[in-house]
Amino acid sequence: MSKQLKLTFVTGAGTVTGANFLLENISGGVGESQKFLIDCGLIQGSSVADPENWKPFAYDPASIDILFITHAHIDHIGRIPKLIHDGFKGRIISTEPTKDITKIMLEDTVGILSHDREHDLHTIYTNENVMKAMSLWETVPRHQVINIEGGFQVRYLEAGHVLGSGMVEIVYEGKKIVFTGDLGNSPSPILPDTEVVVDADYLIMESVYGDRNHEHRDERRKLLEEVIENNYKNKGTLIIPTFSLERTQTLLFEINNFVENDRVPIMPIFLDSPLAIKLTKVYETYKEYFNEEAQKLIKFGDDIFYFEGLRNTMKTDDSKNIVHISDPKIIIAGSGMSNGGRIVHHEKNYLPFENNTLLLTGYQSVGTLGRYIEDGASSVRIMGEDIPVRAHVVKISGYSGHKDGDHLVEFVASTADTVKKVFCVMGEPKSALFLVQRLRDYLGVNASAPNAGDSVILEF
């Protein structure tokens, strides 16, 4: 009798967010009933969390043996408190940086969602549930094999997406399943390149940018430099909505390089995100997870995340006072899609004026304020007011933390000779289906874009 695993795309299929995949051993033999989750993230759209998140899980959390976490973005970890609340008592496994970052990210999410009484989130998003999760958490270095009852061997491969991010490689009966999580836009200024996979049998991969490409690394750096210089000449305020994890650290690294090499004028630059400030400190703790170039700079005394003009604003009053600081200036604040956080206050203040600039550096989900602005809205609704958009709006997609379409195809090409099936998930349908067609046409591989709730049987 052949061995079988059942793979269910619980959420995170047909959409970018809410990664949550269930792998079950249904072979039926003694010790062959394991259930593994890969990621447990929030479904996000126009708000921090979609009401869909609070429906019962499609599985019994108490029956799950292990939750593997690919990385600590909230759309991959955000429902862990609900998983705990609903009875999960199994193991949680990730790399060490991912655990430390997750704790900070979940504590921040508790601060936001615990006020929601409509869905009883104050009973789910508690510090107690975060601490319960941390007590179940185990960490492993990249490439260290974890032997699991039932004949499974699991290890993390470098994804190159955010600090500590890893693809989950599961070997069973001589066959290899790889869950990519999010794949980094390599080469990164800070992180190692995404590891090459050459012998996967089944590949569950992201497809955020499956239908388009980014600017080249040198081009994106040049564009960022030009935006900063133009803002200085216009005596305006440059506001940059950014994700606290990875995007902020990448931008700080780039601006540090500009300032220290006299490529841009000195001006006040505000990192107006308590979360980003905390996460940057975690980055400084795990320098061994940086690429060789970044490690070399640090070794020779460069503080790669700090430069003249930078001001960290932890306190709310300091954030409010930024408006009184003379232009030109730069404000880096969350959230990256403008669906909450301090950035919306700055957008309300600065979008109406032509001498200001809004710089978008990452993906903007459908329904978010950032997406409306990106799509050319002449006015947007912010905190109950209609705000005209007269500021310059600039998009630099090259600073995305995700691989673009060509590099996703290139990633699959390395394992095209062995892979039996590729499942394109974590992307809008247009992007996922476009990538599926390219993989079929260019590489001749069997690829599909499942919908949320779909299940497949993997034969071994």
Image (spheres, grey):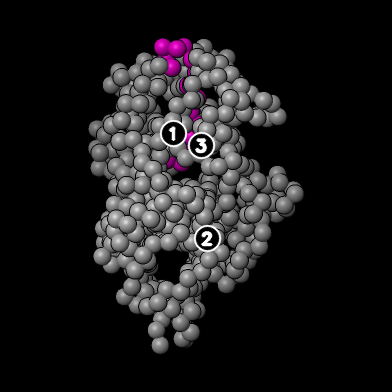
Q: Quadrant of residue 424?
A: bottom left
Instruction: Sort mark 3 into few (<14), some (14-19) or many (20+) by Cα contacts within 10 Å.
Output: many
- Figure check: 290 above or below 65: above
In this rendering, position of residue 237 left or right of residue 226: right
Q: According to the image, label 2 marks what residue? A: 451
Report whether residue 362 is seen. yes
Instruction: Sort mark 2 into few (<14), some (14-19) or many (20+) by Cα contacts within 10 Å.
Output: some
**Place of residue 322 in the rendered image (x, y in percent of width and height, measured from the top left):** 55, 19
User: Could you say which disc has been placed on residue 197 in the image?
Assistant: none
- Figure check: 113 above or below 91: above
Q: According to the image, label 1 marks what residue? A: 361
**Residue at the spot x=74%, y=48% of the render?**
117
**Residue at the spot x=36%, y=15% of the render?**
265
Q: Which tag is nearer the camera, tag 2 or tag 1?
A: 2
Point out the stretch of residues depicted in magenta: 231-246
Who is closer to the viewer here, 160 or 361? 361
In this rendering, position of residue 354 left or right of residue 189: right
